[in-house]
């Protein structure tokens, strides 16, 4: 099964939409820019909970990514691994 390429999401509303549609997100650490990653993730989970979306935030420091999933529609391990590999590929190729 092929995983979709990781998507860049700019705000909480867009994140909620992706998760409600059964997607998941892989945020490379560099995507946070100047934002405090932990604070942003905490605020994201609160925002999603207020909208009835049970989200899980999984930090993977070894790969320098954060994975956000809808707890009701969790992707397979292989899908997450493929998505992280796509982030790594973009990093190597200099993609945004």
Image (cartoon, helix red, strand yellow):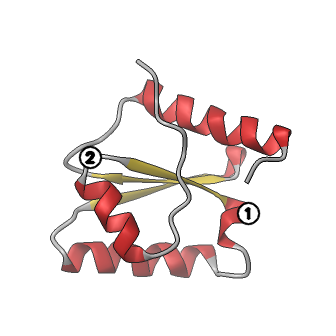
Mark 1 or mark 2, earlier in chain: 2
Tell me if 82 is positioned left or right of 76 in this view: right
What residue is at 69 percent from the left and 44 percent from the top? 63
Which part of the image, by quadrant, shows the N terminus?
A: top left
The residue that disc 2 covers is: 22
Marker disc for residue 52: none
62 vs 88, nearest the viewer? 88
Q: Secondary structure at mark 2?
A: loop
Question: Which residue is denoted by mark 1 in the rendering?
Answer: 30
Give the total number of marks visible in the rendering.
2
Up/down of 27 relative to 80, above or below:
below
Report the front residue among 77 and 83.
Answer: 83
Query: Residue 84: x and y, percent?
Result: 60, 38
Identity of the residue drawn at 19% across and 48% down: 72
How many other residues sit within 10 Å of disc 2, few (<14), some (14-19) or many (≥20)? Answer: some
Q: Going 42% across and 81% down the picture, which residue do you hit? A: 43
**Where 13 falls versus 71 (above or below)?**
below
As helix, strand or loop, the secondary structure at mark 1 comes to helix
Quarter of the image holding residue 12? bottom left
Left or right: 34 as drawn, with respect to 53: right
Is residue 23 toward the left or the right of residue 8 in the image? Answer: left
Residue 25 % position (x, y): 46, 52
Are the residues flagged by discs 1 and 2 in contact, CB closer than 8 Å?
A: no
Q: In x, y percent, where is residue 78?
A: 46, 24
Q: Given the current orientation, which residue lies at the most extreme top position?
A: 1
In-image side of 96 versus 25 (left or right)? right
Dot 1 crowding, Cα within 10 Å, few <14, some 14–19, many 20+: few
Which corner quadrant of the image does residue 27 belong to?
bottom right
Image coordinates of residue 41 in percent, x first then y, are: 48, 72
Q: Where, quadrant-wise, is the C terminus in this rendering?
A: bottom right
């Amino acid at each position: 099964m092929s995983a979709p390429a990781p998507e860049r999401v700019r705000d909480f509303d867009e994140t909620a939409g992706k998760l409600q549609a059964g997607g998941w997100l892989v945020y490379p650490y560099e995507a946070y820019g100047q934002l405090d990653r932990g604070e942003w993730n905490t605020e994201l989970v609160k925002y999603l909970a207020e909208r009835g979306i049970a989200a899980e935030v999984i930090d993977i420091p070894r790969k320098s990514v954060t994975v956000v999933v809808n707890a009701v529609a969790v992707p397979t391990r292989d899908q997450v691994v493929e998505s992280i590999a796509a982030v790594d590929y973009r990093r190597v190729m200099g993609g945004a």
